Amino acid sequence: MYGFALIVGLAIAGGVIAYIGDRIGMKVGRRRLSIFGLRPKYTSMIITILTGVMIAGCSIVLLSLASDYVRIALFEIDEIQESLAAARSDLDSKRAEVEDLSTQVELMGKERAALQAEFDLAVAELARVTEEREAALEELAMLQSKLEDSESQLLIASARLEETEAGLKMVSAQLEQARADVQRAQREIASLEEERKVQTEQLRTLTETRDMLASEVAALERALAETTQRSAELLWEAGQLSMWGTVIFRADEVVLGSVIDCSQPAQVVQEQVNDFLLRVNDVARRRGARSSRDDNDPFVLSFEEANVLAAFQKIDEASGKVVLRAISPVNTWSGEPLTVSLHVYPDELIRREGEVIASARVDGAGGADMVQAGILSLVQEVNSILIAEGMPSDEEGKIGTLLSVSEFANAIIEVINSRSVRTVKAVAGADIWRASASPSIRLIVE
């Protein structure tokens, strides 16, 4: 509203000034006045120009008086432009700063997110540490309780320590006595060392004797085997040449024994039984048994049906190993078929480790031959006992190798060196099961 009144005032002032100038110009023109010696026409023009200048000047003065903005625009425009340029420059710098600040704000936002994540982790870690602290406090309480117990035990230990110190003094005195005993023992050791040298020489001599005896035992075993074989051949030949014949199998004599594994399939078990019977037939043929049907018939065995059925039933019912044994129930003469009775023994523990199987008294002063014969007799007794308890045997009535040569030789040497009557025990070197192929036997000289 203020600007509208100003415009109206300027228009009125301009009109009044123009009117006055026109009236002055008309008067000058009618009167033909002259200024500065100029013609009236130009004088009128000058007055008109001056009138316009006055109108413009009055307008400017009026506007300057009426509005501070107009006065500033007319007289301070350069300063304003400079200030505006400076303000624009400041604005640009501020905008750049704002952009930098925005970038910084974004970075700070990211850092804040990272710090927030770290803070969350720290909170979780704090919770875990708090739990550990509580657990540690509980453990500390337990440790304090144990510490109190330890202190009480320490007091007890201190009392015991005092008693120990007193005992230590007593032990010190005993130690002095022991030192004197040691010196005396050292002197005795020196004399014993001389005695040991003598015994070492004796041991060397005995070792040579043992090796020699071991060689003799091996040779005797070979000779015994050859003699047994030769005796069997001579007996068979004598039976063939005798008018009345000879007994090739005595009543209740064990012909052969073997292990049958009944855990195998039925066909395999049957093959094992058949193989056993064929081996029994071969043993009978070599001894001189013949078939009653035909001399050329290779099968020379005779069975009782009930006995065979009962034996086969036991084999079918067994789930592990059994010992199948063929026994001659009656005397069998040369040229006759062999009547066989089959017996089945389940695999069981018959002797425990260290158990005494048999023993004999052997005189070491009787010489090497007598000692050797006594120990051989003991081994044969062990063989007979184990066969009686159901272990498998070969056609010569032996149960594998009961003793090693070194075990046999060592026993002989020990008895000979004693030069007195000693008790020799044959004990089980390990648990002996009925189906064992080669039981372990040890000889103990007492």
Image (tube, rainbow, N blue to C red):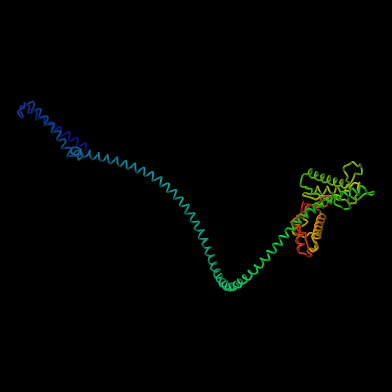
Q: How many marks?
A: 0
Picture layout, residue 168 above or below residue 258:
below
Is 213 left or right of 192, judged from the image as shown? right
Residue drawn at 54 percent across, 69 percent down: 154
- Which of 266 and 83 lies nearest the eye of the viewer? 266
Residue 62 appears in the rendering: yes
Residue 327, x across and y down, in percent: 86, 51
Residue 119, x across and y down, in percent: 44, 50
Residue 441 appears in the rendering: no
Residue 37, x across and y down, in percent: 4, 28
Location of the N terminus (image quadrant): top left
Is 152 left or right of 361, judged from the image as shown? left
Picture layout, residue 65 above or below residue 362:
above
Picture layout, residue 34 above or below residue 282:
above
Location of the C terminus (image quadrant): bottom right
Is 302 left or right of 131, judged from the image as shown? right
Quarter residue 58 falls in? top left
Q: Residue furthest right?
A: 243
Residue 361, x across and y down, in percent: 80, 63
- Which of 217 and 443 lies nearest the eye of the viewer? 217
Is 65 left or right of 40, judged from the image as shown? right
